[in-house]
Amino acid sequence: MKKAIIIGGTSGIGRGLAEKLIENNWTVAITGRRTELLEEIKQKSNNQILTLEHDVTEINSSDVKLESLFEQLKTVDLVVVSAGLSEMNEELKWDVENKVIQTNVNGIAKVYEFVFSKFKKQGYGHLAAISSIAAIRGNRHCPSYSASKAFQANYLEALRCIAKNKKLAIKITDIQPGFVDTPMAKGDGLFWVAPVKKASTQIYTGIIKGRRKIYITKRWRLIAWIMKNAPSWIIEKM
Ligand SMILES: NC(=O)c1ccc[n+]([C@@H]2O[C@H](COP(=O)([O-])OP(=O)(O)OC[C@H]3O[C@@H](n4cnc5c(N)ncnc54)[C@H](OP(=O)(O)O)[C@@H]3O)[C@@H](O)[C@H]2O)c1
């Protein structure tokens, strides 16, 4: 039986993916801050899902807590990093920007580093993390969010380069959703919003196929191409 940990599995895409993995006979552990949700999910799964209260921004205790999950599971095949924070903040309120940076940059980078070094010791593993289509260009509505997602996407690519270069059996997948129907999909003018179930199924399939990058849903690959190639004056108008 394969084993997975989902960082940020209490709601949204992470929770949907946990259900998908269970459906496919994986042993699953999830983490998050909301202990009442962790307990609810554990009970609903008849204690099949392991849970851990874990806040990625608590950098000093992050590794120790995750280590306890690795110890319980003995071996871990897959870690999915879904935890993240998104805030609209065109006004650049620093407390808001800082919170997003502490979560999506500092907190998530610590998790990537911990998981990568664990997989290195174990000799194999698959790290799949959710960045976003927002990683492609700066977005005036959510400056720290789009920048933090670019950080994540580049970090994941760098980890893949290290793994290749050092001939490590570690797979890295960058998942880039457009819009998925969770409370995080904020703002006006949302389109092609995918239900969580559809997003989870496509992510699961992409992970099993060992893809480097997964667009959610698949047609967001087209938007990604347009965004990458759009001239600055169009991006400035958006
Ligand atoms: N929904 C979209 O349209 C969309 C589009 C592109 C990318 N994404 C990305 O997809 C990922 C999942 O988002 P979602 O849409 O599923 O939203 P969500 O339902 O709000 O899920 C976010 C998850 O992150 C966890 N989390 C947040 N802050 C955390 C912290 N400090 N420490 C540990 N866990 C934390 C939350 O758990 P707790 O609150 O229990 O800690 C929750 O499980 C995010 O990285 C997001 O940026 C989403």
Image: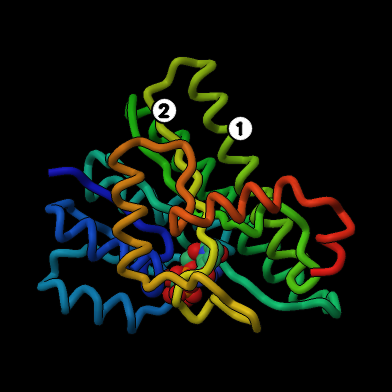
Q: Nearer the viewer, residue 51 or 139?
A: 139
Residue 186 in percent (x, y) is at 60, 80
Residue 55 in percent (x, y) is at 50, 66
Residue 34 in percent (x, y) is at 41, 79
Residue 219 in percent (x, y) is at 48, 55
Q: Residue at x 43, y 52 (%)?
A: 64
Q: Residue at x 58, y 63 (%)?
A: 57
Please identify the residue farthest to the right as the structure is shown: 233
Quadrant of residue 146 within the rendered picture: bottom right
Kind of residue at disc 1: Ala
Depth-wise, is mark 1 or mark 2 nearer the camera? 1
Q: Quadrant of the C terminus?
A: bottom right
Residue 158: assigned label? 1
Q: Residue at x 18, y 43 (%)?
A: 2
Q: Is residue 118 visible?
A: yes
For numbered disc 2, what is the local secondary structure? helix
Left or right: 7 in relation to 139: left
Q: Quadrant of the N terminus?
A: top left
Kind of residue at disc 2: Lys
Q: Residue at x 21, y 73 (%)?
A: 42
Instruction: Please give the residue where the numbered disc 2 appears in the rendered image.
Output: 120
